[in-house]
Amino acid sequence: MIARIWSGESPLWRLLLPLSWLYGLVSGSIRLCYKFGLKRAWRAPVPVVVVGNLTAGGNGKTPVVVWLVEQLQQRGIRVGVVSRGYGGKAASYPLLLTAQTTTAEAGDEPVLIFQRTGAPVAVSPARSDAVKSLLTAHQDMQIIVTDDGLQHYRLARDVEIVVIDGERRFGNGWWLPAGPMRERAGRLRSVDAVIVNGGVPQPGEIPMHLEPGMAVNLRTGERRDVAQLLNVVAMAGIGHPPRFFATLTACGVQPQKCVPLADHQALTHGGVSALLRTGQTLVMTEKDAVKCRPFAEENWWYLPVDAHLSGKEPDALLEQLTSLVR
């Protein structure tokens, strides 16, 4: 229902317009307070790069963060990551992630980024506190990447990168809750780079697609072509589950059942195992896998995806970030 409202297919969005105007008024006022100095943002002693979006729902932002961190690491740059930690609740903040940190504490995306990149990661509702904790623990840190936080103006930033779902783009264009927008599309004029996940990019936008890798068994780590898995049940707890199901289809998998879950939804062994019948194989996203790994069964697999950016603009963006470090 929400997807139909935000796309404009359902006329119910008109009933929500008064709430959208209020949302836009509040969010716009906050940004203007920082822009004109009525509120002061905290500036870190190292460059800060924000990777965020203008809309609610999954746009492929986390794969872009992973790509960016890995690219900077390959250039010898010591990079850290901060996040709000949606879906997690720590005993205290800021929380520096370790190998023992659970998704219940830190949220699924920070744990995924930590496991994939090995970069230091800290979470806190106040992202400036997360940055300070990283710099205290790693005094050689050269640059900070924030996973989300485009609208978190309390943290000053040097570079802003926006990720757009190229298929859905901005829906009906209205603020939440009548539409998917956290900020209106005009905000793109003030950011440093726009990355478009799928669809047809517009002039000036960096094309990106998510490329699936080999399926990985949660228990053993075995890797296998996902098309070789039989009697597949697909599960996706991401911002836009249909994208994952479409990826499986493109890989030659015809799931017997597709189970969309809420983004950041908590998972239990009983709840997940109940999705399967005898002889079926579960295939999930990597984001779900970081939550399921502690209680995984032998027939549970996940399909990782990597962001691939096209054109000359990605190199120019990375050179811009490298020059900030220099």
Image (cartoon, rainbow, N blue to C red):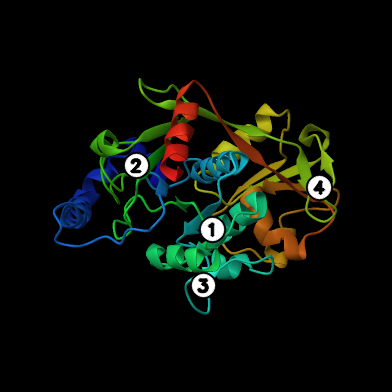
Q: Is residue 313 visible?
A: yes
Is label 2 in contact with label 4 (beta carbons under 8 Å)?
no
Mark nearest the camera among 3 and 2 is 3
- Image quadrant of residue 120? bottom right
Residue position marked by numbered label 2 in the rendering: 6
Which residue occupies 66% across, 50% down? 116
Mark 1 to mark 3 CA distance (whole Å): 28 Å
Residue at horizontal 77%, vertical 45%? 216
Name the residue type under label 2. Answer: Trp
Is 322 or 274 nearer to us in this picture?
Answer: 322
| Distance Cα–Cα, label 3 vs label 4 | 33 Å
The kind of residue on which mark 1 rests is Asp
Residue 180 figure quarter: top left
Q: Secondary structure at mark 2?
A: helix
Lower position in the chain sequence, tag 3 or tag 4: 3
Task: Say whether residue 45 is left or right of residue 88.
Answer: left
x then y, percent, for residue 49: 41, 47
Q: Is residue 185 above or below residue 13?
A: above
- The residue nearer to you, when weighing 8 against 145, is 145
- Picture disc at residue 140: 1
Q: Nearer the viewer, mark 1 or mark 3?
A: 1
Mark toward the start of the polypeptide (1 vs 3): 3
